Structure formats: structure tokens, C-alpha cells
Amino acid sequence: MLENQVFPIPRDSLQIGGNQKERHYELMDKDEYRDISLHHLIRKEKKKFSNRIREFDRLFEANRNTPENVTDEEVCVYLCTDCHLV
């Protein structure tokens, strides 16, 4: 899924590594599509949950090389799943 490549979740087994990720991102996530791509639209200012989503983006980016620092609970909250941890 493109969103997982642009906004990866730590410990996500579906992450694409290395140059393949960069190449796919360049092909699929050009600036011309940002105004119609849902994964960008929901992060725009003044959208209902954009601040919270961007907080998670910062957390995940800060822990890209140390994914063990992101808890299962944080991932569940981000994904809004019923994991009985929240």
C-alpha cells in the first residue's frame, strides 16, 4: 500500500526496503497527486484528526531505526483497531 511506503509504521512487516521503496514512491506519489491522495488529505491542517495523525508520523519517523521504542498500544491507537490495549 502506498500509504505504508510514504508514512511507514515501525515494525510493519510490509515495509519495502532500500531503493525499491524510493523508486516506487517516485512513481506513485508525485506532488501532482497530493491534493487528491487520501493519505495526504487527512494530514492537512484543519482536518479533524490531522494533528494527532502528524504526531504519530513524527513518532514513527523518530523511531525509524529503533522501532522497538514504539509500543503495540501506540500502533493500535494509530490504526484505530480494537486491540483491547486502549
Image (tube, helix red, strand yellow):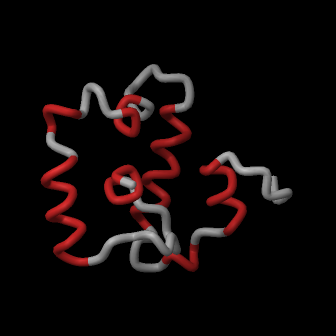
The one nearer the camera, 1 or 56, is 1
Classify residue 13 as left or right of residue 86: left
Q: Residue at x 29, y 27 (%)?
A: 36
Q: Residue at x 44, y 31 (%)?
A: 42
Q: In the picture shown, does residue 56 fall above or below 24?
A: above
Q: In the picture shown, does residue 36 fall above or below 18?
A: above
Quick one: which residue is furthest to the right in this view? 84
The quarter of the picture where residue 83 lies is: bottom right
Marker count (numbered): 0
Q: Position of residue 61 (x, y in %)?
A: 40, 62
The one nearer the camera, 2 or 80, is 2
The one nearer the camera, 19 or 61, is 19
Q: Position of residue 75 (x, y in %)?
A: 62, 60
Classify residue 8 as left or right of residue 73: left
Q: Position of residue 17 (x, y in %)?
A: 29, 76
The quarter of the picture where residue 39 lies is: top left
The quarter of the picture where residue 8 lies is: bottom left
Classify residue 1 as left or right of residue 49: left
Which quadrant holds the N terminus?
bottom left
Q: Position of residue 46 (x, y in %)?
A: 45, 20
Quick one: which residue is furthest to the top in this view? 46
